[in-house]
Image (cartoon, helix red, strand yellow):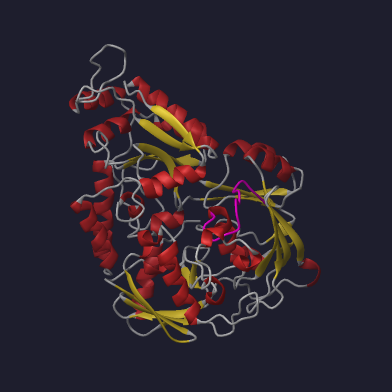
């Protein structure tokens, strides 16, 4: 499936809402609920996403909450569309003031009604307590709730991609959180209360097992699965072994798939099926922090790009299920994708560029010193839980050593890695993926990862770049957007704030004894379409 990016979706949306208002039919439920013998009593999901604590700040717990127990105003459908969730419709006349019309019968799991005031409270509460809030919603000036079913949000300037940002924000109950001063310490069952189709009944921290049951007073259509267990595994190998034995029904990973290494054994099992999708994110990206000395040199970054054997990386890590994006950074499935120069492996050119940038081996030890004569040992950060990234980083070290760069690898746990890239910004280089949703936020085209005003893993503070990004945010005309998107990709190809090492298609195995599995570009296999449409074969 080729995903339509949100840029096209919202272009269509805007043409509708500017003329009148836009009411959409939700894609989050099926026309015929699963009944009788076809219902699934319990679905067991395996994951390597470990829940450390059941509070709103725990990354993995947030993933599962947004899929099962909580809902947002809007969400991302299976084909990449922005579709209704708690909002049944929305309209805007200028991309600055957005009016959302909410469902009227939704309740929280404790029976209290969901109202527009909960949405207003959530936005204010997150602004106060969520350290990443400003990265996404810095331009949100005000949130009003004139009545129980209407929310009005006002931005400081037109926001073309505002809806994609809202899709990441699950609504919280005001009557519970208004008395919670520190959400990081709030992990009692009250912290689990949402408006979704499932209720979290128990969490075993020792084993990482989360047990969910259907909420019998759910305001929408009843989902097709009565109970869901999410079972934690320390590594993918043990999870896949359990999957082959039938101990779990599906392995789940957020916004990514699984290594082709597992495919042959999985295909030998008649109860297992495999679906593949084009990746709307990027599997492996080398990030440069341009706010650090030496890494602010375009020539240096270009030199590193020519040191990498992309074909070898693709063959080793994707086994025919991947590709090498151009220097323009974005995947080919992206709307307004522009073909830029191919990423090329050229050791001699890499060495020439390093010489030109002043990186030379002055003491004869085989490694280059920095232009100021200092010892140069750049540090490359990698997440310890991403085994394939650890292996890829070892390959990158080999390539950079070959051109005289004495790179040092630093392997970190997920939490520490995230703190550095998202908040501290002390890294020099890092190896990390992008997600479909991450590529769409900000002004799209991965700009939020590059722009220091948002996530800013590359910490780019270039007026040329930011002008293009800001124009993309406020431009509706499709031809102008196409031109701006092309300019942005040309900028990436020339400046190289990040290098796509390789990209792999999504490989998602599943239990063939159940029918109705749907892969969502943002949320993966665990999404509303699967929850409401899955049934016995």
Q: Is residue 56 magenta?
A: yes
In magenta, the rendered stretch is 46-58
Which residue in the rendered view is the most extreme toward the bottom?
A: 147
Q: Please give left or right for residue 30 compared with residue 535 in the image.
A: left
Query: Taking 8 as reference, is 378 above or below it?
Result: above
Give the quarter of the image for residue 404: top left
Which residue in the rendered view is the most extreme toward the right?
A: 37
Query: Taking 119 as reference, is 146 above or below it?
Result: below
235 or 26: which is nearer to us? 235
Task: Tell me the residue at 27%/36% (across/down).
Answer: 295
Number of marks:
0
Residue 303 spot, x, y in % from top left:
27, 30
Q: Is residue 288 magenta?
A: no
Residue 167 spot, x, y in % from top left:
46, 66
Residue 351 spot, x, y in % from top left:
26, 23
Give the quarter of the image for residue 108: bottom right
Residue 158 spot, x, y in % from top left:
28, 71
**Residue 284 visible in the current orientation:** no
277 or 182: which is nearer to us? 182
Task: Tell me the residue at 35%/20% (across/down).
Answer: 402
From the image, give the main secondary structure of the stretch colored magenta. Answer: loop
Q: Please give left or right for residue 126 compared with residue 104 in the image.
A: left
Q: Please give left or right for residue 495 compared with residue 324 in the image.
A: left
92 or 456: which is nearer to us? 456
**Residue 344 visible in the current orientation:** yes
Quadrant location of the C terminus? bottom right
Task: Tell me the residue at 26%/67% (across/down).
Answer: 474
Give the quarter of the image for residue 63: bottom right
């Amino acid at each position: 499936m080729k995903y339509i990016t949100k840029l096209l979706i919202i272009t269509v949306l805007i043409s509708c809402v500017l003329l009148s208002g836009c009411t959409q039919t939700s894609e989050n439920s099926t026309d015929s609920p699963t009944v009788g013998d076809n219902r699934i009593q319990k679905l067991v999901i395996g994951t390597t996403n470990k829940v450390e604590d059941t509070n709103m700040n725990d990354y993995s717990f947030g993933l599962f909450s947004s899929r099962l127990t909580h809902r947002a105003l809007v969400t991302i459908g299976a084909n990449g569309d922005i579709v209704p969730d708690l909002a049944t419709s929305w309209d805007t006349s200028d991309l600055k003031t957005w009016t959302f019309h909410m469902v009227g019968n939704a309740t929280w799991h404790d029976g209290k009604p969901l109202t527009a005031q909960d949405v207003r409270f959530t936005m204010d509460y997150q602004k106060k307590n969520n350290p990443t809030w400003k990265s996404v919603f810095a331009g949100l000036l005000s949130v009003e709730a004139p009545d129980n079913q209407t929310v009005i949000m006002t931005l400081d300037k037109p926001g073309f991609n505002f809806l994609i940002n809202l899709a990441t924000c699950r609504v919280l109950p005001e009557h519970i959180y208004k008395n919670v001063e520190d959400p990081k310490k709030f992990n009692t069952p009250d912290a689990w209360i949402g408006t979704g189709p499932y209720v979290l009944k128990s969490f075993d921290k020792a084993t990482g097992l989360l047990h969910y049951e259907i909420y019998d007073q759910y305001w929408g259509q009843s989902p097709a699965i009565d109970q869901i267990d999410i079972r934690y595994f320390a590594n993918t190998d043990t999870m896949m072994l359990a999957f082959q034995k039938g101990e779990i029904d599906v392995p789940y990973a957020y916004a990514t798939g699984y290594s082709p290494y597992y495919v042959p054994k999985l295909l030998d099992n008649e109860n297992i099926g495999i679906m593949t999708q084009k990746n709307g994110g990027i599997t492996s990206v080398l990030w440069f922090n341009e706010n650090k000395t030496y890494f602010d040199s375009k020539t240096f970054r270009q030199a590193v790009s020519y040191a990498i054997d992309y074909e070898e990386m693709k063959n080793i890590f994707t086994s025919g299920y991947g590709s090498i994006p151009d220097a323009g950074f974005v995947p080919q499935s992206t709307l307004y994708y522009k073909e830029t120069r191919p990423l090329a492996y050229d050791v001699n050119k890499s060495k020439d560029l390093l010489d030109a940038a002043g990186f030379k081996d002055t003491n004869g030890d085989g490694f280059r010193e920095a232009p100021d004569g200092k010892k140069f040992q750049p540090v490359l950060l990698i997440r310890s839980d991403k085994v394939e990234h650890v292996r890829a980083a070892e390959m990158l070290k080999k390539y950079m050593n070959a051109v005289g760069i004495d790179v040092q690898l630093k392997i970190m746990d997920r939490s520490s890695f995230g703190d550095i890239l998202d908040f501290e910004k002390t890294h020099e280089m890092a190896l990390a993926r992008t997600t479909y949703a991450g590529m769409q936020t900000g002004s799209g085209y991965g700009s939020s990862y590059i722009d220091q005003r948002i996530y800013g893993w590359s910490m780019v503070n270039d007026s040329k770049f930011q002008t293009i990004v800001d124009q993309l945010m406020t431009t509706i005309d499709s031809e102008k957007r196409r031109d701006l998107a092309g300019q942005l990709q040309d900028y990436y190809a020339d400046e190289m704030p990040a290098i796509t090492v390789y990209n792999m298609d999504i490989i998602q195995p599943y239990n063939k004894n159940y029918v109705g599995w749907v892969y969502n570009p943002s949320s993966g296999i665990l999404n509303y379409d699967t929850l409401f449409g899955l049934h016995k074969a």
